[in-house]
Image (spheres, helix red, strand yellow):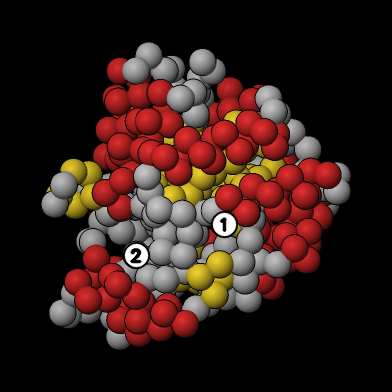
Amino acid sequence: MSKIIITCAITGSIHTPTMSDALPYRPQDIADQAVAAAEAGAAILHLHARDPETGHPSSDPAHFMAFLPDIKARTDAIVNLTTGGSAIMTLDQRLAAPLQAEPEMCSLNMGSMNFALYPMAARYQTWKFDWEKPFLENSDDLVFKNTPRDIAGVLTRMGQERGARFEFECYDTGHLTMLRHFVDRGLVQPPIFLQFVLGVLGGMAPSPENLVHMKQLADRYFGDGYQFSILAAGRHQIPLAVMAAGMGGHVRVGLEDSLYIARGELATSNAQQVAKIRSLVEGLGREVATPDEVRAMLRLKGAAHVGF
């Protein structure tokens, strides 16, 4: 098996500040947690921005630039910027920061889908900020839009024009079919880095059977021209990551995907989750890849060619 890539998703746009005091939303906290996650073994840092006053998901390039140079100065980890942002953002809003920052990697959701967060609203009685509860509750009528035209635009503007490679986020089997379509169109070339996303209400359920099925489909569609990773939401994060590691895949952890370190126990940081999964995958005999090794594996342009 190849060396294993650990990605850490630092803050995301799903969880809200009420849910965990460890969830970073101020620039210094995002930077500090990102650097600590890299020191714990994460080669890729998947990053969103937040309004530093309220913790609300933000697409403002200034909010990204408040932490990106600091992260670059303190670690050689690969910065992977979201192009998904939040389902409440337009495509132009979601792309504003990546177009300016020109990172080595971006995430790219491979289709439109329901993105339902509303069940989480019932778990809390009091809130740190007024926006949190309606943000969650209103997701019962929310569609994340990423049409074929949107996807082609991201591939062109971020990939062909700015040299970014992609973390292709696949929430369902049809997203793999769509990715195959863009391979056939010549807009995607190997090596392909797939992120199987299981556990979001609107996408595939987080089950071992679904992970195996996605891997079988990827084998059929992409042959030996791809690498796969697993992102499992909530309590499924660690079990499915260990399963993927045993299958020769890669893993993603972080407070974007789960706020917990064990059953009923909130994680104290992103680095704590990275350290846990690193210990588990090394116990399986997998060696953790360094950022420069990942750059070679995924043919990235290098940190000297970013815009921050």
Looking at the image, is mark 1 or mark 2 earlier in the sequence?
2
The local secondary structure at tag 2 comes to loop
Q: Is residue 268 visible?
A: no
Q: Which residue is mark 1?
A: 82
Label 1 amino acid? Thr
Label 2 amino acid? His
Q: Crowding near pointer 1: few (<14 within 10 Å), some, many (20+)?
A: many
Residue closest to the eye, 286 or 226: 226
- Left or right side of 129 for 303: right
Q: Crowding near pointer 2: few (<14 within 10 Å), some, many (20+)?
A: many
Q: Name which residue lies at 46% across and 39% down.
A: 211
Q: Which residue is mark 2?
A: 15
Give residue 169's position: percent from left, percent from top: 57, 50
- Left or right side of 265 for 294: right
Q: Name which residue lies at 73% across and 45% down.
A: 180
- Residue found at the very far right of the displayed protein: 186
Q: How many marks?
A: 2
Give residue 165's position: percent from left, percent from top: 69, 43
